Amino acid sequence: MPKVLVPLAQGCEELEAITVIDLMRRAEIDVVTAGLDDEPIVCSRGTLMIADTTIDSALDDDYDMVVLPGGLPGANNLEKDSRIQGLLVNMSNNDKYIAAICAAPKVLATAGLLVDRKVTCYPGALKDYAIDGLVYEEKSVVIDGKIITSRGPGTAMDFTLELIEILTTQAKRQEVESALQRPA
């Protein structure tokens, strides 16, 4: 069973975080949520979330993928956290999947992971970053090797279904998507 880490920073976008966690668990993926501290996470719209563990404890395990929810100031908090930066570099060095949605691709930019990459994000989230060879695409989801990015809350389901297919099978993705009763 694939194992995924979802770091939850204060101010994260709850729709993105919950969509990733919920749909991946429906796909029988082992999802571990980790707060940057041991406090309940107050999301960008005021929703309270309780993480499974702290990032310090979570870093003792290995993961097939890390998924960063966006939202502000959540993405800024992830970006400033040296443990998250180290995790991303380690995941990249070990050829593991890294996914980020909304403003969270800026965390990947700070880690140096977007050079010569195709990427999408919330409009303007990367405007203050000078990244050599970056190609911005206005798509719901962009996959470039083991880096997967998406635009925002409205693309969270498409993003997560892509991640499910990457980690499992197209059949598992279709099984999860069918049960959601999304319009064709």
Image: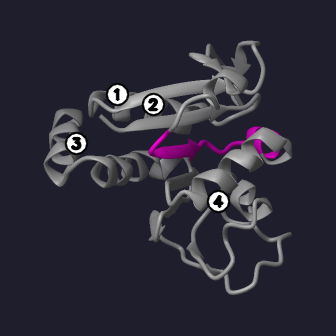
Q: Is residue 73 visible?
A: no
What residue type is disc 1 on?
A: Arg
Horizontal relation, residue 83 to residue 153: left or right:
right
CA separation, marks 4 and 2? Answer: 20 Å
Q: Please give the name of the residue rendered at 44% of the width and 45% of the height, measured from the top-left corner.
A: 64
Which image quadrant for residue 126?
A: bottom right
Q: Picture coordinates of residue 32 (x, y %)?
A: 51, 26
Is 38 one of the magenta-colored residues?
Answer: no
Q: Where are the magenta residues, as a range?
A: 63-78
Mark nearer the N terminus (1 vs 4): 1
Give the labeled residue for mark 3.
177
Q: Which of pointers 3 and 1 indicates the residue nearer the eye? A: 1
What label does residue 25 carry, if any?
Answer: 1
What residue type is disc 4 on?
A: Tyr
Whether label 2 touches label 1, CB < 8 Å: yes
Disc 1 packing (10 Å; few <14; some 14–19; many ≥20): some
